[in-house]
Image (cartoon, rainbow, N blue to C red):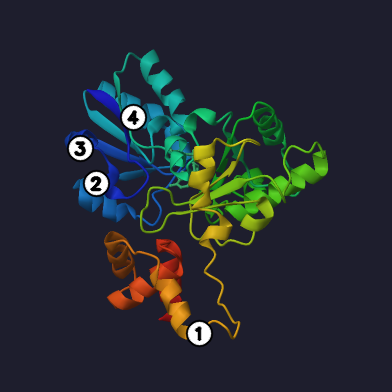
Amino acid sequence: MALYLIGLGLGDEKDITVKGLEIVRQCDEVFLEAYTSILPGIQLEKLEQFYQKKIQLADRELVEQGCESKFLHVVQQGKKVALLVVGDPFGATTHSDLVVRAKQLSIPVKIIHNASIMNAIGATGLQLYQFGYTVSIVFFEKNWRPDSCYDRIKMNRKNGLHTLCLLDIKVKEQSAENLVRNVKQYEPPRFMTVNQCISQLIELEQTRQENVYDPNKTMCIGCARLGNWENELIVAGTMNELLQVDFGTPLHSFIICAEQLHDLEKEFLHFSSVEYLKPPKVNTSSSSTQEEEEEEEEEFEVDAQDIKLVMSSVPGVSRDSAIAALRKHRGDIMLSIKLLKGQQ
Ligand SMILES: C[S@@+](CC[C@H](N)C(=O)[O-])C[C@H]1O[C@@H](n2cnc3c(N)ncnc32)[C@H](O)[C@@H]1O
């Protein structure tokens, strides 16, 4: 008997580890924690199909208040129970409480780790060792605009460290009115976007005026759907530049870089800068012939794997069109897919 906390990673149903999958298949009860993170675009049925196991959704109420009856007492009856967590089980502080409660009852807890947003942000090119406090950016309400994240960002910037901002997720939340009236009616799910996060951070800088960051100068990075190869997007620029970018579907994260970047970080960031990702400007001057423009486009060498990815994401698209789109966007898969989908 044991309680298993199993990380699912960030990409899709196939990111679970071999060990994790073996345990899921042996468990008597399997729950999916469904309020601190999601697998972008992956439905429960897809997980059940791949894991060959019935999965029950576990909302905050179940994990925090029903944990004794649903998990701990069931394990005490000699059963194996798994709680699946997107990312790593300890990528959210929430689950430490569950482990403490299990330990108090001498229930064995086994953890199967996986990739988390906390280490996947290394894909931006910033060195993980150079990050300071991670902050949560919560949705501002009319009369509640918390600014504790500003102090943490200030401390990180003072110490020459990057700040990872994790963005609010609201699932199965009651409106203030329904909460007061104890009406169990829930608001539609909301996932904070990079753009909403930036707007709130700009408002905080305007309110506090301590020059912690400059919306026109400080280097920042917006990330969407990390770990999901076909759809992930990483764009670096100032807050005002990134406000113009559509980061698409959830989940999003945001980074405020340290004032000084390591040379290698700078080199890496160049490839996700707004400037670099911008589609090449069309040269309208009469001195440039169409032949010259085509030659320029052909200079960019397209990766065979990228062509496959684009073709599999845009049904019916020809290989030539996929190559042309990738050349136009200098190998950026996400932008190429967007372009081709827009043309259909
Ligand atoms: C509580 S944290 C992450 C918990 C998860 N257990 C983990 O280890 O990654 C949830 C937040 O992380 C960020 N996040 C998680 N997965 C992400 C992804 N694939 N791409 C971008 N941001 C992500 C989002 O800001 C999201 O609101």
Q: Quadrant of the N terminus?
A: top left
Report the amino acid beneath label 1: Thr
Element carrying mark 2: loop
Mark sitting earlier along the chain (1/3): 3
| Residue under the image location 49 percent in, 39 percent down | 264
| Residue under the image location 47 percent in, 84 percent down | 290
Name the residue that disc number 4 marks.
Answer: 71
Residue 165 coordinates in the image, percent (x, y): 58, 40
Mark 2 → mark 3, Cα distance in angstroms? 18 Å
Element carrying mark 4: helix
Marks 3 and 4: which is nearer the front?
Answer: 3
Name the residue that disc number 1 marks.
Answer: 289
Mark sitting earlier along the chain (3/4): 3
**Quadrant in the picture for residue 67:** top left
Report the amino acid beneath label 4: Phe
Mark 2 C-beta closer than 8 Å to ligand 1: no
Mark sitting earlier along the chain (4/1): 4
Marks 4 and 1: which is nearer the front?
Answer: 1
Name the residue nearer the viewer: 228 or 170: 228
Mark 3 → mark 4, Cα distance in angstroms? 23 Å
Report the amino acid beneath label 2: Lys
Name the residue that disc number 2 marks.
Answer: 54
